[in-house]
Structure formats: C-alpha cells, structure tokens
Image (cartoon, rainbow, N blue to C red):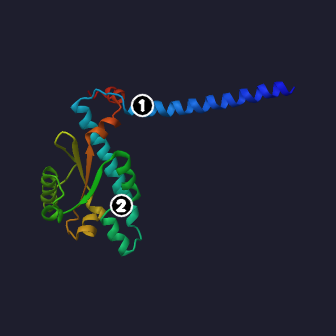
C-alpha cells in the first residue's frame, strides 16, 4: 500500500510540475511573439499610430475629467502638469511613450517640443482662435518617432483651467516610438481589415 501511495504522490508532483511548465510555456510564447520579425508596411504603421493615439487620447481625456472632479487647488496644479497620474504612468511604462498636455503658452515658451510638434500646435491655436473644427494629426519625426496630437474638446475646459486661455484650447501630444508601434501591430488583424 505504501508503495502505491508513493508512486501516486510522485505522479501527482510530476503532473503539477508539467502543468506549471505548460503555463510558463504559454507566457513565453506570448513574449516571443513580441520579438518576432514582422513585415509591416508604412500604411500599417500609420494606421496603428492613429489607432493607438486615438485610443490613448480618449482615455486621457476621460481620466483627466475624473481627476478634476472635486479636486483641491494644489492637486489641480499637479494634474495640469500631469504629475502623479496613474494612467499616464501606466501608458508610459507599457508603450515607452511621452505624453504632454499643450496649450497656447507652449508655442513660445516650450523649447522641448519637436519642430513639427510646434508647427501643429500653432495651427491648432490658429484654428481655435477662429473657432474652427479641429481633428487629430499624425506627424513623423525622423525615422524612429511619431507625434499624434489630438485636441481636447472645448467643453472640457482644460485650456481655460490649465492655461488660462479663454478659447479653451488644449491638446494631447503623444510621442510614440516606431519600434513600440510595430510591436503592437497584429498583421493578421490589419489584413482582415484590408490594411496592407
């Protein structure tokens, strides 16, 4: 009897180790998919930048509105400077990107902006002054970066609150690394959408 019990225990231990290895194998396969060489077109990359940018901008706007509800003035200033924002920290870590909240004052004073980013910001400010409709914009910076900019709707009051701008003008500027964009592309899914 003891012999059968010993054999049963050994089998159970081996079986549990096998399941653990299988579970780890699945995780490893998922990680390896990130490092596979992918053939992607410029169209697919641009599409992915726009999809990621739109999704991130929408989440940022919703999170910003939640953060601003019933907030004290000290925290309000932190939020306008994008400090201690869990969503932004999480997105930055996950996609290795840079997120900026920009408004009218950044046109003349922010020396950290890329030239294309500044040009787009100027165009947004001009459209805001004329009360024109504004949409998202994607710009390529060199060979390795993209800047996705998205205006924050006037009714959110971000421009007025964070930049003391009566037009209510403010935009999200999301700087994405090309390598991270490519990692996030699901080539099969894009082909199904006929994006080649």
| Quarter of the figure with the C terminus | top left
Q: Residue at x 36, y 55 (%)?
A: 88
In the foreground, 178 or 35: 35
Residue 61 in the image: state x and y as whole percent. Answer: 33, 56
Q: Residues within 10 Å of mark 2 (few under 14, many from 20)?
A: some
> Is 41 located above or below residue 145 in the figure?
above
The mark lying in front, picked from 1 and 2, is 1
Residue nearest the observer in this picture, 69 or 21: 21
Left or right relative to 176: residue 70:
right
Cα distance between the residues tagged 1 and 2: 35 Å
**Quadrant position of the N terminus in the picture:** top right
- Say if 23 sits above or below 161 in the image: above
Q: Position of residue 91 (x, y in %)?
A: 37, 50
Q: Position of residue 110 (x, y in %)?
A: 17, 62
Residue 59 appears left or right of 4: left
Closer to the chain start, of discs 1 and 2, is 1
From the viewer's perspective, is 30 left or right of 175?
A: right
Residue shown at the point (57%, 30%) measured from the top left: 21
Q: Residue at x 72, y 26 (%)?
A: 11
- Residue 64: mark in rendering: 2
**Residue at numbered disc 1:** 32
Residue occupying the far bottom of the picture: 73
Dividing the picture into quadrants, the one containing residue 178 is top left
- Vertical arrangement, residue 10 with respect to residue 181, above or below: above
Q: Please tell me whether mark 1 sits on a helix, a strand or a loop.
A: helix
Question: Hey, which quadrant is residue 34 in on the image?
Answer: top left
Asked if residue 48 lies left or right of residue 8, the reply is: left
Q: Residues within 10 Å of mark 1 (few under 14, many from 20)?
A: few
């Amino acid at each position: 009897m003891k012999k059968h019990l010993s054999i049963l225990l050994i089998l159970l231990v081996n079986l549990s180790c096998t399941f653990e290895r299988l579970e780890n194998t699945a995780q490893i396969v998922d990680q390896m998919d990130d490092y596979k060489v992918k053939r992607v077109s410029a169209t697919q990359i641009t599409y992915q930048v726009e999809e990621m940018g739109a999704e991130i901008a929408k989440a940022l706007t919703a999170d910003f509105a939640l953060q601003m509800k019933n907030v004290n003035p000290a925290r309000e200033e932190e939020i306008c400077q994008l400090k201690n924002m869990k969503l932004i920290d999480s997105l930055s870590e996950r996609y290795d990107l840079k997120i900026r909240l920009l408004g009218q004052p950044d046109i003349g004073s922010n020396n950290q902006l890329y030239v294309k980013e500044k040009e787009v910001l100027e165009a947004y400010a001009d459209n805001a002054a004329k009360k024109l409709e504004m949409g998202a914009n994607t710009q390529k910076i060199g060979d390795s970066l993209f800047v996705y900019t998205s205006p924050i709707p006037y009714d959110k009051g971000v421009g007025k609150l964070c930049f003391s701008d009566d037009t209510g003008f403010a935009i999200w500027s999301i700087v994405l690394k090309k390598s991270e964009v490519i990692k996030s592309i699901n080539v099969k899914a894009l082909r199904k959408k006929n994006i080649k």
